[in-house]
Image: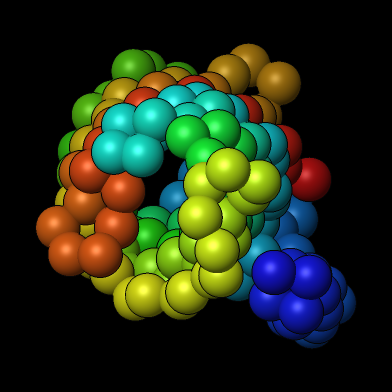
Amino acid sequence: MKKTLTITVWAAALTLAFAPVMTHADMDNPGSKVGFRGWGPRAGVTFGPDQALFGAHMDFGNFADHIRFQPNVDIGFSDGFTLFSANADAAYRFASNWDVWSPYLGGGIGAHHVSANNGGGNGSSTKFGASILGGIEKGLANGHRFFVEAKLGLADSPDMKAIVGWTFYH
């Protein structure tokens, strides 16, 4: 688990160091550029396993019309083990107007590392899975974004995640 977390942190740091950053002029249309635009925390719960989760995500902009790439990591606790997930998610945002509530749909692939805690069995394993997601988000007056999201696991992923998050833009 420690090795996986270290690798993920280094990969994120290198990505941030070399990615183009959104300028103040881009804030009128925050979905218009590809490259690192912002980051934020996320928290929620998973069902199957039943856990509380905490994590972070990065917004890398739109690589196609209305389609944003937003990789994320989270760690879940409880139910006898710890679950660390690293996901590569993309979502289609239905509205182009930034300051309105807008639904979005998408999906992604992820790596999920499970470590057993005391009483939860022995050992650990890593599996790769897929999920679909949907949510609603709103760009805020200060240039940031708030969202509520649900993810449904399709293969070797948690059955469901309910997440709230905030994205901070430069």
Work out whether residue 141 or residue 155 is closer to the camera in this orientation and state it: 155
Residue 54 can be seen in this image: yes
Name the quarter where the N terminus is drawn.
bottom right
Asked if residue 62 shows in the view, the reply is no
Q: Residue at x 14, y 58 (%)?
A: 154
The image quarter containing residue 48 is: top left
Taking the image as shown, residue 91 lies to the left or right of residue 148, namely left
Image-based side of 12 in relation to 86, left or right = right
Q: Residue at x 23, y 43 (%)?
A: 159
Q: Nearer the viewer, residue 115 or 120?
A: 120
Q: Residue at x 37, y 75 (%)?
A: 127
Q: Quadrant of residue 68?
A: bottom left
Residue drawn at 39 percent across, 30 percent down: 50
Q: Is residue 163 above or below residue 33?
A: above
49 or 137: which is nearer to us? 49
Q: Is residue 134 left or right of residue 30?
A: left
Q: Percent x, y for residue 148?
A: 40, 23
Q: Measured along the vertical axis of the image, is residue 130 above or below residue 136?
A: below
How is the structure coloured here? rainbow
Using the image as rendered, state which of residue 146 and residue 31 is in the foreground: 146
Name the spot of residue 147 as percent of width and height, x first: 45, 26
Question: In which quadrant is the C terminus drawn?
Answer: top right
Find residue 120 and report its horizontal and vertical position in percent: 52, 47
Q: How many marks?
A: 0
Rendered location of residue 144, percent (x, y) = 64, 29
